[in-house]
Image: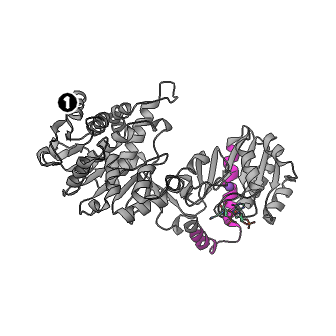
Amino acid sequence: MRTAYTSDQIRTAERALMALLPDGTLMRRAATGLSVVCAGLLPGVYGSRVALLVGSGDNGGDALYAGALLARRGARVEAVLAGSRTHQAGLEALREAGGRTVEAPWPDVVRRADLVVDGLVGIGGAGELREPYRRLAVAASEASGLVVAVDVPSGVDASTGRVEGPAVRAQVTVTFGACKNGLLVDPGRSYCGRVELVDIGLGPYLPDPDVVSLTDEDVADLLPRPGAESDKYRRGVIGIIAGSERFTGAAVLSVGGAVRAGAGLVRFAGAKAAVGQVRAHWPEAITTVLDGPSVADVGRVQAWVIGPGLGTGEEARELVRAVLATDVPVLVDADGLTVLAGDRSMLRRSAPTVLTPHAGELSRLLDVPRDRIEAARIAHVRRAVTELGAIVLLKGSTTVVAQEDRPVRVNATGTSWLATGGTGDVLSGIGGTLLSAGLSGYDAASCAAHLHGLAARLASTGNSGGQGPIAAMDVARALPQVIQSL
Ligand SMILES: NC(=O)C1=CN([C@@H]2O[C@H](COP(=O)(O)OP(=O)(O)OC[C@H]3O[C@@H](n4cnc5c(N)ncnc54)[C@H](OP(=O)(O)O)[C@@H]3O)[C@@H](O)[C@H]2O)[C@@H](O)CC1
Ligand SMILES: [K+]
């Protein structure tokens, strides 16, 4: 499991460790690790041009010391001192090693560098970058050389991943001691490139993580696998209520996600047209044409999925109410969430409820503008959990899953090609299947997001290794191969 922390958590751990070590030890460790990564990126250190963007804090100090180490190996190191102050010991080290400082015009220095080291701000950064950092961040992002961010790309909020205004776009981010939340969550994540962690001995002093990210191994351990004693009922019976006379595709895709994720049995109930399509595509499912808002005829299930393509009228409302009145876990998606936004009292129940909104749906549920949710996904998914009393999977460029009193789980899989119609319906079927197999809502939601992202990657990757468009059904189809590979 990968773990990540807020800036405050990192600072607390740093203070505890620093108290035990001679002054400057941590910065030396950080700078040595940084210089090793930088040297590994250059075809040769000797003779290469390195531009250091140096801010006024310790982030700039790291860059200066790393620059000194590279200069000792023959790199031509030029430092742009952008802050009102400069880390003096770091500057002396750079000068002693043969590095030099340069005056404006700075963009030329950045343009001609083989490697740009962004040491403007790290965990001490707050809010939008001010000038001249702002201009340098833009120049670095447009540079033709490699860009390495020190600890966190400048302009990215280390605790939240929030980006206001320009920020440095790096190919590699070298982070110290532990990963920061903002390196795992969009929009910050998309500025980091590859993240390299340099161990500086902080481990024993770190608290419980604020954010975690499951690995393939974690998901493999959590996934239910049928044993010799398993039959279809014991593996899990999932009930899906989706689709309408007008929208039938969502039903087919949700059932597809469930069948291909390994449901023991899928019971599908919906409007006649949706039932017809589900039967045509998935003969494995047992179907019921719903006659009114009762789910009594569908049969026993261990978990429900309700919402994709359901509509938001009176009948849909009563169906959502009926499903939430049962005593089994329920996953509510899409139109089901819009219905819930109109009457959150339905969420008062004792069995687990998993909600799977995208930012627009969460905006309706919380009455918060969508762009605010997208800018601060962790804070809003937490708020949703507290306000709604449910487990919440917030879909998007970074999918995050939260439950009360547990770290937010950030999904590490997926591809930009996944942003296409119907993929959310497939996700609901996967999540419901895992719930019906007995996983907790928190595990079911996070494993579903992980598998969904892996399946999308597999489906979108061609023989050449490049990625291309996918249809939602391709994601469902790729699920068995992904589960086999874990
Ligand atoms: N944690 C660890 O264990 C270790 C941490 N280490 C390193 O220390 C780093 C943290 O150093 P830090 O505390 O000195 O803060 P830092 O990130 O350099 O920035 C502070 C300066 O930025 C400025 N500034 C802020 N916001 C701004 C804005 N929007 N726009 C423009 N300027 C802005 C603000 O300037 P001021 O307003 O004071 O002029 C302030 O002085 C950390 O990221 C890591 O690299 C390693 O060396 C060793 C182990
Ligand atoms: K930085």
Q: How crowded is the residue under tag 1: few (<14 C-alpha within 10 Å), some, or many (20+)?
A: few
Ligand 1 shows up in the quarter that is bottom right
Is 21 inside the magenta-drawn segment? yes
Q: Please indicate whether residue 465 sits to the left or right of residue 48 in the image.
A: left
Q: What element does badge 1 sit on?
A: loop
Is 362 inside the magenta-drawn segment? no
Residue that extends furthest to the right in the rendered view of this protein: 103
Q: Which residues are magenta?
A: 11-40
Q: Residue at x 43, y 30 (%)?
A: 470
Residue 139, horizontal then vertical, whole percent: 75, 45
Viewport quadrant of the N terminus: bottom left
Q: Residue at x 47, y 26 (%)?
A: 462
Q: Mark 1 belongs to which amino acid?
A: Pro
Q: Please indicate whether residue 24 sits to the left or right of residue 441 in the image.
A: right
Residue 272, compared with residue 430, is above or below; it is: above
Residue 425, horizontal then vertical, whole percent: 34, 40
- What is the basis of the colouring in this image? one colour
Q: Which residue is mark 1?
A: 283
Residue 132, compared with residue 58, is above or below; it is: above
Q: Please indicate whether residue 325 sits to the left or right of residue 109 in the image.
A: left
Q: Please indicate whether residue 210 sits to the left or right of residue 85 in the image.
A: left
Viewport quadrant of the C terminus: top left
Say if residue 46 shows up in the picture. Answer: no
Residue 204, horizontal then vertical, whole percent: 52, 67
